[in-house]
Each structure stands twice: as structure tokens, then as C-alpha cells.
Amino acid sequence: ALTSLGWADIMAEPDAPAPTLTPGIPEVGLTVLAGAPKVGKSLFLTQTALTVGRSLLVFEEGSRGGIAYRLRRQAEALNVAEPELRMLHLQHVKLDNRATVKALREMVAEYRPVMVGLDPLNRLHGADENRPTQMTPVMDALAGIAYDFKCAVVVVHHLSKPSMERRGDIWDRFRGASSIRSGT
């Protein structure tokens, strides 16, 4: 059965913006961190994970040693001695595969992170990024984790390289279907 909210129910909600984990990242919700290659998306993700508290990072690219080196240097610079951090590295997490989504959800349910960071989106599924019908379930899996477990989910996504066709607004370079944007 469907349940609707009346005006009084809607107005009973706090008259304030949604709380943020850090500027630009809601405490509960899905954020796509998109940018050109080598602008610091992964660095921002790991720094945020080190500073916000209990975090789970899912890396589907990069070397374990390289990631550990970066985390060690960032933690030292931030004066964070023992961050509450867990990492999945090259575990073949596929957000369009029910079994791996279930396993990821079980890990989130057990660990209860305030933030789940995933890097990069294009390695986290086998879907065609340009087909909304294929990307909607991927984005729904991410949003489901955020809303079901009341945490921030941040996923790194790459922009297309500039070209004659893609040189205007930043959204012109946002790679993939609009369901990636609308899923956030």
C-alpha cells in the first residue's frame, strides 16, 4: 500500500538544509565526485575518509601499496593516528551484480560506516554507461546503501576528455547517461 504525507507531515520536518558530513557531502545520500583525470578526486575521497570517522573505501583500480602510501602520508599530515578505516581493494565489486551488491550491503550493515567511498565508477559495473536502463540499477544500488544504512556514499567518476563536441558546460563532459546525475 502507498502512504502519502499531508501538508502537516511535510511541515513537521526541520526547516533546515540536510546535514552534511563535510561541505558538499550530505550525511545521508549519494554524491558523485566527477572531474578530469589527475585533479585530485581520489585524494579528496581518501582525505575525507580519514577525517569524517568510520569509513569503508572500495578501490577497483590502483596498487595496494600506492593506496597505502597515500593514506599513510595523508593520515600523518592530518595528524590522524589510527583512523577508523576499512578498505576493499580489487575485490571485483560490481554494482550490477546482485551477489556482490548483497555482499557489500552485508559488510556495510556489519561495519556501519558514516561514509562509503568507491573509486572509480566505471570499474564498479559491467553496464553501458550511456544506457539509462543499465545505469539506473547501478545508481539505485548506491543510493540504497546510502538510505538504507543512513550513511554518505561517495563515488568517483571521470569526465570525458575535451573535444570539439564536448567543450562547453561541464555537464557536456559528464560521462554516461543522465541517470548517473539524477541518481544523486
Image (cartoon, helix red, strand yellow):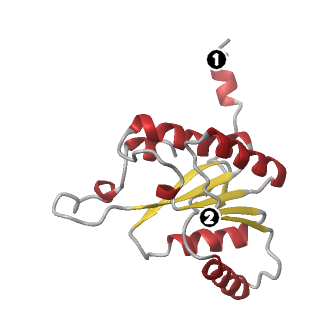
Q: CA distance from mark 2 to mark 1?
A: 43 Å
Q: In the rendered view, would you say 105 is above or below 82?
A: above
Q: Residues within 10 Å of mark 2 (few under 14, many from 20)?
A: some
Q: Earlier in the sequence, mark 2 or mark 1?
A: 1
Three-letter amino acid code at the position of disc 2? Leu
Provide the residue designation for mark 2: 90
Residue 107, how many percent across, how many down?
77, 51
Three-letter amino acid code at the position of disc 1? Ser
Image quarter of the N terminus: top right
Residue at point 44%, 75% (across, down): 39
For label 2, the SS is loop
Residue 73, how many percent across, how many down?
67, 87
Q: Residues within 10 Å of mark 1 (few under 14, many from 20)?
A: few
Dot label at residue 152: none
Q: Name the one closer to the observer, 126 or 168.
A: 126
Residue at point 32%, 61% (across, down): 160
Q: In the rendered view, would you say 46 is above or below 117?
A: below
Residue 136, how many percent across, how many down?
48, 38
Instruction: Please identify the residue farthest to the left as the structure is shown.
Output: 164
Residue at point 22%, 63% (across, down): 167
- Of circles 2 and 1, which is in front? 2
Is residue 150 shown to the viewer in this render? no
Q: In the rendered view, would you say 4 is above or below 165?
A: above
Determine whether, in the image, residue 48 is placed left or right of residue 129. Answer: right
Provide the residue designation for mark 1: 4
Q: Name the one closer to the observer, 178 or 120.
A: 120
Q: In the rendered view, would you say 82 is above or below 52?
A: below
